[in-house]
Image (cartoon, rainbow, N blue to C red):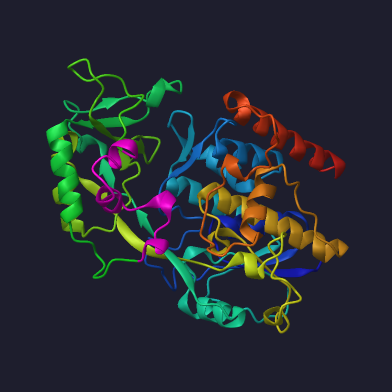
Amino acid sequence: MNERVRVIGGGLAGCEAALQLASRGFQVDLYEMRPNRQTPAHRDGHLAQLVCSNSFKALGITSAHGLLKAELTLLGSYLLDCAREAAVPAGDSLTVNRDIFSELVEKKIAEFPNITLHREEVTSLEGDCPTLVAAGPLASDALADDIFKRLGSNRLHFFDAIAPVVETDSIDFDHAFYMNRWEKGETADFINCPLDKETYTEFVNKLCEAEATEPRPFEKRELFEGCLPVEEMARRGYETLRHGPMRPIGLGLGNNGHLWYAVIQLRAENKQKTLFNMVGFQTRLKWGTQKEIFTMVPALRNAKFARLGCMHRNTFIESPKFLDKTLRLRPELDCAKDIPPTWFAGQITGSEGYTEAVATGWYAAWNMAQTILHGHADPLPDESCIGSLMNRLVEENEDFQPMNFNFGLLPHHEGLKKKNKKEILAERAERAVREWIAARNMA
């Protein structure tokens, strides 16, 4: 096949899309502007670089992300294969060594002779071949301006934050212990750093008073609720952190026989466990302030930080207005008239999360291929995780905001009891995907 397509963006969505399109015989031009043009959040020019965290979250199919991964496995996701190969111990979650993961994805891309990687910035949707835009939440200003001018929409954006990473040998294990929440998993992979009431109170007060890197507070709608900076959570109330990333539930009892007052969990960054990140501690605080506050934690008093947290902008389009259920820019719109057929994938669509990025990359590439080859798209069923996530992205919404996949997006039916609702919905979703695959002889 000589059909040429263009994929803009070498992140999770773009790489999955490029691989899926190449596997179906397309000649793929994959564009990634890094390292020639960097973003505020990335460290280098590697493809599929994980910025915020190194975790693809839970594996069990009764968890939203576990079920989403199960579907992608059935559908033949290349990036999930890479994630499993780069996995580090993390209880019942899929957590990876970031560098190894990126290397494996780059190797996959290089193995396909019909993928040409271009290290250059794309500044416009104009072109001579069908295009898939996976420019991520940090699209270059030039490309973002071109997209939003065409759509006639104000630029939409929210602010995402990156958590600090600690060197393991600098942690004081007189005040820390290994344990997975509820002791799930075969080995204890998380480091837990407890705080007593007095320390927690001082910690929260310091966070509330701390100065952020930005000179002005951002509007609330710009902060994605699933990834709030820790200082923002602290300002929402004294107990917020104790019911969020510092919850002590499932981590045993303290020395006094009572539940720990508050606990910070650390999760391995690499297989050697020489680096751990502070789970849920994404932040926009100034670096000096981060060190001052985080070293108040007894286990982190002498902590050496391999990386401190920072803030970056995430940009997304108002998908319900512009995309159809296949993630294609609606061809009947004026903004689609003078550009080639265009699909969107990844966080620029308003999907949030690593696994969701891979899922939208797979889904947009599949529908793009079907449209080019057969003249019509072929979306996944509504009962599936991916199908329900796509419905959410394109359904009419006056205040469209980014969202992770969750069980609430799946079609519900009367009579489902809370006790086994997730099991029933998970079984139904997985069965729907298997039947969809079988009907297309994709197995």
Considering every residue shown, the one lying at the far top of the view is: 257
Residue 299: x %, y % from top left: 18, 34
Q: In terms of image quadrants, where is residue 270?
A: top left
Which residue is drawn at the image coordinates 51% and 80% (left, top)?
A: 145
Please state the extent of the stretch shown in magenta in the rendering. 219-245
Q: Is residue 224 magenta?
A: yes
In the rendered view, tell whether residue 63 sits above or below residue 333: above
Residue 295 visible, this orientation? no
Which residue is drawn at the image coordinates 41% and 47% (left, top)?
A: 53
Residue 42: x %, y % from top left: 40, 61
Number of marks present in the image shown = 0
Which residue is drawn at the image coordinates 69% and 42% (left, top)?
A: 411
Q: For this view, does 174 lie left or right of residue 69?
A: left
In the rendered view, tell whether residue 415 sits above or below residue 155: above
Residue 225: x %, y % from top left: 42, 52
Q: In terms of image quadrants, where is residue 7?
A: bottom right
Considering every residue shown, the one lying at the far front of the view is: 414
Q: For this view, does 386 lie left or right of residue 353?
A: right
Q: For this view, does 358 lie left or right of residue 375?
A: left
Q: In terms of image quadrants, where is residue 330?
A: bottom right
Residue 329 visible, this orientation? yes
Instruction: Looking at the picture, tell me which residue is in the foreground, 150 or 2.
Output: 150
Q: Quadrant of the N terminus?
A: bottom right
Q: Is residue 402 magenta?
A: no
Residue 443: x %, y % from top left: 80, 39
Instruction: Looking at the picture, tell me which residue is in the foreground, 8 or 291.
Output: 291
Instruction: Looking at the picture, tell me which residue is in the foreground, 115 or 43.
Output: 43
